[in-house]
Image (cartoon, rainbow, N blue to C red):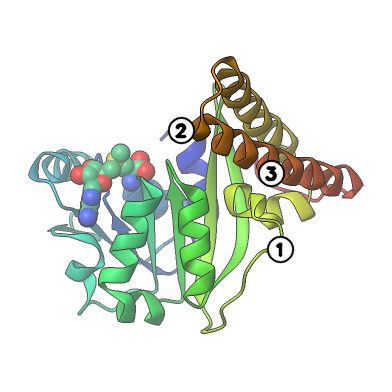
Amino acid sequence: MKLTNRLKVIASLVPGESIVADIGTDHGYLPIYLLKNNDVRHVYATDVNRGPLQAAKEFVTENKELKRVDLILGDGLSCVKEKDVDGAVIAGMGGILIQEIIQRDFDKAKALSWMILQPMTAPEKLREYLMQNGFEIIREELAKEQRRIYQIMLVKFTGESTNYQNSFYYHIGEKNVKENHPLAGEMIEQYKEKQQKILRKCEEKTTPTTQKRIEEVLALLRQIEEVEQDYANGKNTGHVE
Ligand SMILES: C[S@@+](CC[C@H](N)C(=O)[O-])C[C@H]1O[C@@H](n2cnc3c(N)ncnc32)[C@H](O)[C@@H]1O
């Protein structure tokens, strides 16, 4: 079975022999891949919408895995609250939605041995929330499909709140830089180009609002440059690409 690069990197972080909740499973590709390739024991494949859950049911049936996959219609972690799961994957949703899912069932999120989170947007909001609320980001990964680089994090509740000195790390993950992920340089460059574009746009027409925005962008660009320097000083480690 062939998975997209993003889902493959997510799967590479799921511990073998675990009982997994795939929150927002959609097509159900990840549960089947995990059963076939990661030796996971059981998957709770959940979705808040009927259409995606039906698609997942068809895929699971096609793969003759109805015994090892429970399909549950429900919102976030609430539908696995009473289930004995080791960890959860919450992928392919906005960072703020992932944050809300964790916040709504905080006790369940705290009790899990691991969570694998893959925000499509606002990774900085999600990281800030996690770090301020006692979750440790144990590992960061990146996956590239065409030009888009996806961010994936493995987290666990420890109860210790932390923060980053340079706030650009909330956007791209400190470990991606310090551990010199092969895609981190390209991701930094993409962020930098985006900020420079915003800056040029704001400079075309200066008003008090754009002036404030210019100052914010310039401050972020200074932080990006510091991080770029950190990345240049690092050394390579073996990451999944
Ligand atoms: C873009 S798909 C991602 C599918 C898969 N997780 C992936 O990464 O490829 C997002 C899925 O999350 C589901 N979803 C959105 N909000 C949810 C929530 N609060 N609880 C459970 N599922 C949710 C949607 O119905 C949709 O099927």
Q: CA distance from mark 3 to mark 1?
A: 14 Å
Say above or below: 171 vs 86: above
Does residue 176 appear in the picture of this structure?
Answer: yes
Relative to residue 79, is residue 238 drawn left or right?
right
Q: Residue at x 51, y 84 (%)?
A: 159
First in residue order: circle 2 vs circle 3 = 2
- The residue under label 2 is which amino acid type? Thr
First in residue order: circle 3 vs circle 1 = 1
Q: Quadrant of the N terminus?
A: top left
Relative to residue 202, is residue 37 drawn left or right?
left
Q: Nearer the viewer, residue 12 or 117?
A: 117
Question: In which image quadrant can residue 62 be found?
Answer: top left
In the rendered image, which residue does mark 1 sit on? 165
In the rendered image, which residue does mark 3 sit on? 219
First in residue order: circle 1 vs circle 2 = 2
- The residue under label 1 is which amino acid type? Gln
Relative to residue 32, is residue 134 drawn left or right?
right
- Is the Cβ of the residue at disc 2 closer than 8 Å to that at disc 3? no
Q: CA distance from mark 1 to mark 2?
A: 34 Å
Q: Residues within 10 Å of mark 2 (few under 14, many from 20)?
A: few
